[in-house]
Image: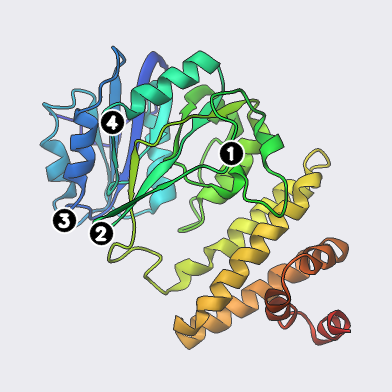
Amino acid sequence: MPSTTELPPATSRIPGRISVIIPAMNQQDFIGDTLASLARQRLKGRELEVLVVDDGSTDATAAIAAEFGARIPGLKIITHPANRGVSAARNTGLEAASGEFVVFLDPDDWFAPNHLAQLADGLEALDVDYVRCDHVRVTGGNRTLYRAPQANRNVVLDPADDISPIHTATMIDYPLVWAGMYRAEVLKSAAPRFNEELRTCEDRPWFWSLALNAKSYAVLNAHGIFYRRGLPGSLTQVFDDRQLDFLDAFAGILDMVLGDPAHEAHGPKALRQFLAISCHHLGRSAQFPPALRQSLRAGIAERLATIPRPLLDEGLAQIDAKRRKALTGLLPSAAAKGESK
């Protein structure tokens, strides 16, 4: 039977072992499909470790997962007695993982049978710190392939070089932690932990840290991850204060970039992301409760006020007039009047 207790941190890495970390909270309807896809993996002789972090579930998530103990010998179930959020669940999995390679998988998604072997083969052959891949979005009965925004495939790349340009989608705009495989030893220093204060948008600062600190990566022609969209209860369907965590996430990203002379050249890209996501939330804020809508506007205004004015002016000048007007309307009145001249 799989373990169901809080596990001690892993003390050594097993060469060739792949650790799959699954944060799960009340996923009884989907966790079976997710684990069945792992039981079907063809790993070419590699070991598989599956760490299901049951994050305070009140349904049958843990019991269903435990039923896969015979089919997945490397299955471990780690229990959070109370819900602590996806960042904490992933961090618990990272602390317990013993594999040379780490993969994240959401509890309502699944892998094609050759997916993990394909990622591991590419990571080993190219000898890079991590690899990224495409994915298939599943919305009801529809499946659509989404390609990672990097045309150069199966070659060694510098992750920092793929942060820019500002006006085009790059790999820093593809913050899907489950669309890839990572060397565990690299994560220790490059992107050690997820920010547990962030209930949403936790992936973006993690990827910024990885891109700035890792030395090499590659994008593979692989698309064996199936990502469910539009499920009831998804954060894209819920309007509460968790939607505002992007404010703190980007405050951290901008501090990370602008606080280090070696990285400040990436400030315009980080700002561009913040402005775009702010406008996205402002555009859908009519669906928010009034208090949340007010908090959103106040939070964006507060963050804008902390950005160096020359950088902010340049960033605002580069977006379209409609979005620029929406954001300048949140600035102090004198600054807004100046912008409109």
- Name the mark nearer the viewer: 4 or 3: 4
- Name the mark nearer the viewer: 4 or 2: 2
Q: Amino acid type of disc 4?
A: Val
Q: Which residue is rendered at x = 45% and y = 58% of the image?
A: 199
Q: Earlier in the sequence, mark 2 or mark 3?
A: 3
* Rendered position, 240 above or below 64: below
Residue 50 numbered tag? 4
Instruction: Identify the residue under disc 2.
Output: 140
Say whether residue 100 is visible: no
Q: Position of residue 245 (x, y in %)?
A: 53, 63
Using the numbered discs, state the Cα–Cα distance from disc 1 to disc 2 in whole angstroms.
28 Å
Q: Amino acid type of disc 3?
A: Asp
Count of number-bearing discs: 4
Task: Looking at the picture, tell me which residue is in the foreground, 123 or 207.
Answer: 123
Q: Position of residue 241 (x, y in %)?
A: 47, 72
Using the numbered discs, state the Cα–Cα distance from disc 2 to disc 3 in whole angstroms.
23 Å
Crowd around label 1: few <14 · some 14–19 · many ≥20 (10 Å): some
Q: Amino acid type of disc 1?
A: Gln
Using the numbered discs, state the Cα–Cα distance from disc 4 to disc 2 in whole angstroms.
27 Å
* Rendered position, 61 above or below 271: above
Crowd around label 4: few <14 · some 14–19 · many ≥20 (10 Å): many
- Name the mark nearer the viewer: 2 or 3: 2
Q: Secondary structure at mark 2?
A: loop
Task: Looking at the picture, tell me which residue is in the foreground, 52 or 327.
Answer: 327
Instruction: Identify the residue under disc 1.
Output: 150
Instruction: Identify the residue under disc 3.
Output: 59
